[in-house]
Amino acid sequence: MLIVMDNHATQEQINNVTQKIEEMGWEAKQIPGGERVAIGVLRNTGAVDPAIFIDLPGVRDAIPVSKPYKLVSREMHRENKKIILKNGEIVIGGDKIVIMAGPCAVESEAGALEIARLVKEAGASIFRAGAFKPRTSPYAFQGLGETGLKILAMVRDKTGLPIVSEATDPENCDLVEEYADIIQIGTRNMQNYSLLKRAGKAKKPVLLKRGMWATADEFLMAAEYIMSEGNHDVILCERGIRTFSQHSRNTLDINVIPYLQKETHLPVVVDPSHAGGKREQVIPLAKAGAAAGAVALLVEVHNHPEKAFSDGPQSLLPEDFVKLVAELRGMNFKV
Amino acid sequence: MLIVMDNHATQEQINNVTQKIEEMGWEAKQIPGGERVAIGVLRNTGAVDPAIFIDLPGVRDAIPVSKPYKLVSREMHRENKKIILKNGEIVIGGDKIVIMAGPCAVESEAGALEIARLVKEAGASIFRAGAFKPRTSPYAFQGLGETGLKILAMVRDKTGLPIVSEATDPENCDLVEEYADIIQIGTRNMQNYSLLKRAGKAKKPVLLKRGMWATADEFLMAAEYIMSEGNHDVILCERGIRTFSQHSRNTLDINVIPYLQKETHLPVVVDPSHAGGKREQVIPLAKAGAAAGAVALLVEVHNHPEKAFSDGPQSLLPEDFVKLVAELRGMNFKV
Amino acid sequence: MLIVMDNHATQEQINNVTQKIEEMGWEAKQIPGGERVAIGVLRNTGAVDPAIFIDLPGVRDAIPVSKPYKLVSREMHRENKKIILKNGEIVIGGDKIVIMAGPCAVESEAGALEIARLVKEAGASIFRAGAFKPRTSPYAFQGLGETGLKILAMVRDKTGLPIVSEATDPENCDLVEEYADIIQIGTRNMQNYSLLKRAGKAKKPVLLKRGMWATADEFLMAAEYIMSEGNHDVILCERGIRTFSQHSRNTLDINVIPYLQKETHLPVVVDPSHAGGKREQVIPLAKAGAAAGAVALLVEVHNHPEKAFSDGPQSLLPEDFVKLVAELRGMNFKV
Amino acid sequence: MLIVMDNHATQEQINNVTQKIEEMGWEAKQIPGGERVAIGVLRNTGAVDPAIFIDLPGVRDAIPVSKPYKLVSREMHRENKKIILKNGEIVIGGDKIVIMAGPCAVESEAGALEIARLVKEAGASIFRAGAFKPRTSPYAFQGLGETGLKILAMVRDKTGLPIVSEATDPENCDLVEEYADIIQIGTRNMQNYSLLKRAGKAKKPVLLKRGMWATADEFLMAAEYIMSEGNHDVILCERGIRTFSQHSRNTLDINVIPYLQKETHLPVVVDPSHAGGKREQVIPLAKAGAAAGAVALLVEVHNHPEKAFSDGPQSLLPEDFVKLVAELRGMNFKV
């Protein structure tokens, strides 16, 4: 923390800030400049709240210098985190682009199994589908719940594909942890702290989607919540943010990929389906995500998108998905 | 829903869309234009998912015409909703600006009571303070929980001020409903549907804060969730949105006030404290909110903001709060 | 400027940064912290470019501490700037809310004069209308040019109202300076530096609209451009910014008013017409702007908005304008 | 245009809208729905201004159905536009990724020539450098002007690389047209209509950068301005937009690439340097841009970025640029 004093600040005001810093058990270091004085806060453990200083008389600004997160930080863990599934057969953060594919929601046993077989055949190594669906409208399809999870478990048994599925509250997180292989936390719940804490106690990896409003640092702090409860297997998923740009449902924050890779050792995944919101955007965004360094892709695929209960227009058709995998391989990515 | 066809669409493609509409049990109406054909969807009940049409061959766009919400809509309820407290002594949506004031969090019995007496004396009619605090960092103060709620109940007994306090998950919503007079749902939980549904079953009014990422229509749909469970006493609170503008913590969407007042009969409240994030912004934003038509204000006040456990820098000092009320009265608002 | 070193930075890297600072003729001050070293840059005149340091090995961040602007800064000029017109009869930044009203564009002599008389009668003290119109479409009405300015001069002669009108390039700025009393620079031209420099040489006050994308600091830097050429009579106009919020054409950044008033001595004006984009938004936004501290309002008024050549739907009708002035007076503003 | 009536609209109000449409010379088509009536506007040539209807009594909304642009539209020109340079040796929009590389600004003859040779050797086919620099601060380096252009012409003579350089007003556009091979219009000038019109009369291709605030449709309308003056050789350049996301200088709108490719036949280029603002972001963004379908890249390269007069921290070092080209080729792009 650097406290910047007003250029009219009095010596008494400066002393007052210094005293406050020392009261907190920290060290104050004055930095006299040409126009104004700044005061560094040293020897603090953990983040310093600007609130403590910003209101003191003569203070112009309080600028955080350190990042607020610890466990997620690459400064703490230099090596890339790898998420290991199926005894190492699948590694998120390894040398392959891992593709998690499937419909938005589980709709029926036959339907889920058919899509799972299609995406496995085409190159996916994890099956994705929701049993608990957070929907903007209370009148929209809300998912099959535990029945859906049982279908997913059956699909895993028959195809060998691990399952990623979303939990939307601490209660259904128990069920998702029981049936699925990766627990997904959706964009709307990125700061649902009760859910984050519950996921932090789970024995399964957590795929955390970025809130469509969240800064990269808030995203990392949400991952810190999970890790602070003991679960260090966190996968970060960029899925598009809210901007003024309305030609697509969201704007994929492609810049966040290199930023996250610099700041954290956790694996970064891209969801091109929600980032685009229209089928025609999915393949370009998926390829862009891989090119920018994402280690995995989360892609919606449906064999009858026009009949899907949700998110049909952003689902790839099976033949589009085959094309996507071929184009990724054409760019020399291992899938 | 209006389906706009490509200007190269074939007659077969047009017929195909028409047939699809009729399969859904709706009526199709062709609108031949100079360059292209559009097709209206009629006789539908509830919103039509663009997903159904956007992928059909020859379709260029599917434009929603109706709004997706019902219960919150002013078209359904022409008269302003009033939230009645204390047998009509307090009316949110009446001819007075109702001020809900207090600290961010309950910190101690003595502290809460002192602030409550100060704000009551100055003109507040509802006391606000959090017992369950959603915090960005897992290492920050998380609130006193039920102990905090008991303190708040005691403050109500001694001051006569009704209490508004936040619930952050369905579980603690039980407690908040038991102790508080108004259940607050915070910005991060605006689309926490488990919590919205629980609040929809509560017997107390709900103050719903807009998600900092949410469009006005998503905000209304979140209120619709609560109302669809039976609780029609919903108060909408604008508290600032995320924009590129970084001179304040958020940007108060002052435009949303007249928009909401046109679209819904529910009362609209402004939270100038979170919208600004700095003390110096609170009074101007509070006055702007009232001037734009808000029927109540939610203001953070702390007598020792530099020692507050959270949100100190945006808390008004008691003397600032007195000034705010005086300035509102100077503008001929009844407080 | 504060240079924050990586927590793994070597002593050599730290020395290297120190040496670089000294090479620039500045002073380096090391601030050893618990985890990492920071280095303050002192004795610099003018802003320090982070570019100089951010790429040096071992540097994690370079944080600006001072603001980049000078002439616009309240630190340089403590007292509010007043813009004086008509020998002091009109003061922008005085104790009255100055209202500049009129149509988007001059359309005809009779029309302009009629509207000018209506708005004067209702309480406006400056007439606004465009002769050079920047339009999104090349096929839309582009303004009457010099003919329009001549009409405006005639309107001034007949009504006594000073004129504010927009210049869109250095060339037509000559004409606007000749005919109008205040030269307006529009939002799209906020960083048209050729135009800013030309306006900086003008002998008339400049009303500078904020770019809909511009941070407050970029807005102030644009004003700095004008002032750096010698023209210190600059009026800052907030007219709404681009956000994800699409229920209004723009989002009025009401927070920027107190921010600007803290940072600069220049007068701050609000344009509720462009900020809202719909008639129903204009009165609430105008009142909010005044309540937040704006010293003047720029309002579009048209007696036949449905026939206006541009911006009809956001123009107030004369009777609405009368209502706005009455409501401002009802809030005890002097108009 | 579709006019949506209020569900309480009277028959008289509906007739009134119909009459208004017919007065404009268009055709009205009523679409009676279950809850409300909508009215289609047919047989119009050019865009219909919602302003005409939105204020009429009983009208709830006026929804544009057609796009406002013509000449830029892919509906008018199905085939991709190719920009041909050096008698076909260089084709922007062909099967190769064209790389335009060089420093932000021309600083000296020797420096420019050295960088040009380096980037040519590494795979660039066009040299970029600014002689007229739009800078946020009036106190920053503003470019060498015509001297800079003469240096660029000399660099072209010695290296064979065509030159792209920025014009910032109609006046210096004359000079840029004279010396350069492609005229660049910068982000801040995307709606500087005087400049767009001047560029529309030029005999050289125009590289138009998207305004950091501009919707995709406004971007296309700016290109329409240029084309409407007769110059059809327009290259669209995405360079990042303003969002709340502050970990990078801008957010590359990667979604806009497939959107533009659907809407227009004009070639789409990505500028990863401004989109990222930090060296570490440039290579990932460049690769993402190519993967998403951009036909060319505009990359800042400087051999001594720490001494560059502007934009040093986002300039690639020559060795980074070599790496970028190698990685693009590794992804099977032809460079």
Image (tube, coloured by chain):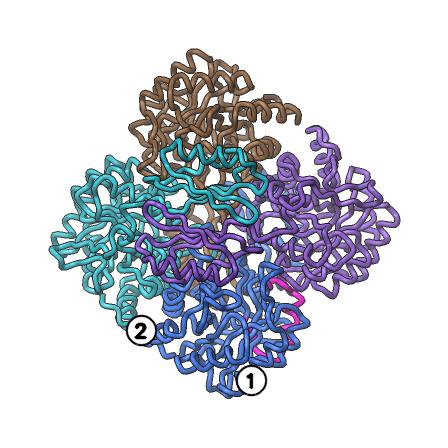
Chain colours: A brown, B cyan, C blue, D purple
Give the camera-side residue of B207 and A22: B207
Magenta range is: C189-207
Residue at image mark 1: C154
Residue A18 is left or right of residue B295, and the answer is right
- Distance, label 2 to label 1, CA atoms, is 34 Å
The answer to the question of whether label 2 and label 1 lie on touching residues, with beta carbons closer than 8 A, is no
Residue at image mark 2: C331
Check the residue under mark 1 and report the chain it is in: C
Horizontal and vertical percent for residue C306?
Answer: 46, 66
Residue type marked 1: Met
Check the residue under mark 2 and report the chain it is in: C
Residue C329 is left or right of residue A123, and the answer is left
- Location of the C terminus of chain C by quadrant is bottom left
Q: Label 1: how many residues lie within 10 Å, few (<14), some (14-19) or many (20+)? A: some
Residue D277 is left or right of residue A27, and the answer is right
Describe the element under mark 2 as helix, strand or loop.
loop
